[in-house]
Image (cartoon, rainbow, N blue to C red):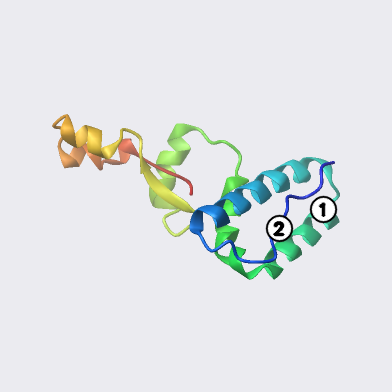
Amino acid sequence: MEDPPELPKRDPETDSARNRIAKRWALWLLRALRRLPERRIALAARALEAVGYLTGFFDEIETALDEPRPLDDLRRAVKAEADRDGTHVHHIVEKTSAEQDGYPQSMINSYDNLVRIPR
């Protein structure tokens, strides 16, 4: 099994750098879930918690570990999981393009065009 990703001791000070670190850890944890005893995963999670600058990324890391879901489930989640941290509502057909093509807001923002996905 590969070693955990590097975890800088200092805050990288930009959201994009923090995001890259969080994503690397999320991917490592996903692979670890498939291969390691649960005890080692808990130790890695405690190490992540000790690094203050990643505190705001735990919800994103958790949702990044979600299994793929069918489109209908993602549509239902717009309402059903409205308070789930680490996710956001995404337009299937890109909002700006649809507006430029003259589609009405009622169609652009209808639940047929919205899904809840990991951030």
Name the residue tied to disc 2: 7
Q: Position of residue 17 (x, y in %)?
A: 55, 54
Q: Which numbered disc covers residue 47?
A: none
- What percent of the width, then of the height, locates residue 106? 18, 41
Q: Is residue 63 above or below residue 68?
A: below
Tally of numbered discs: 2
Label 2: how many Cα within 10 Å (few below 14, some 14–19, many 20+): some
Reply above or below: 13 against 110.
Answer: below
Left or right: 99 with respect to 23? left
Residue at 30%, 35% (x, y): give it. 94
Most distant residue in the top direction: 101
Dot 2: element: loop
Q: Please determine whether, in this image, residue 42 is positioned above or below residue 94.
A: below
Residue 29 lies, in percent from the top left, at 72, 48
The residue at 67%/67% (across/down) is 51
Q: Residue at x 17, y 29 (%)?
A: 101
Q: Label 2, label 1: how many angstroms apart (C-alpha)?
A: 20 Å
Q: Which amino acid type corresponds to the residue marked 1 in the rendered image?
A: Glu
Residue 13 at least partly seen = yes
- For label 1, the residue is 38
Q: Nearer the viewer, mark 2 or mark 1?
A: 2
SS category of the residue bearing label 1: helix
Give whichever of discs 2 and 1 has the lower sequence position. Answer: 2
| Amino acid tagged 2 | Leu
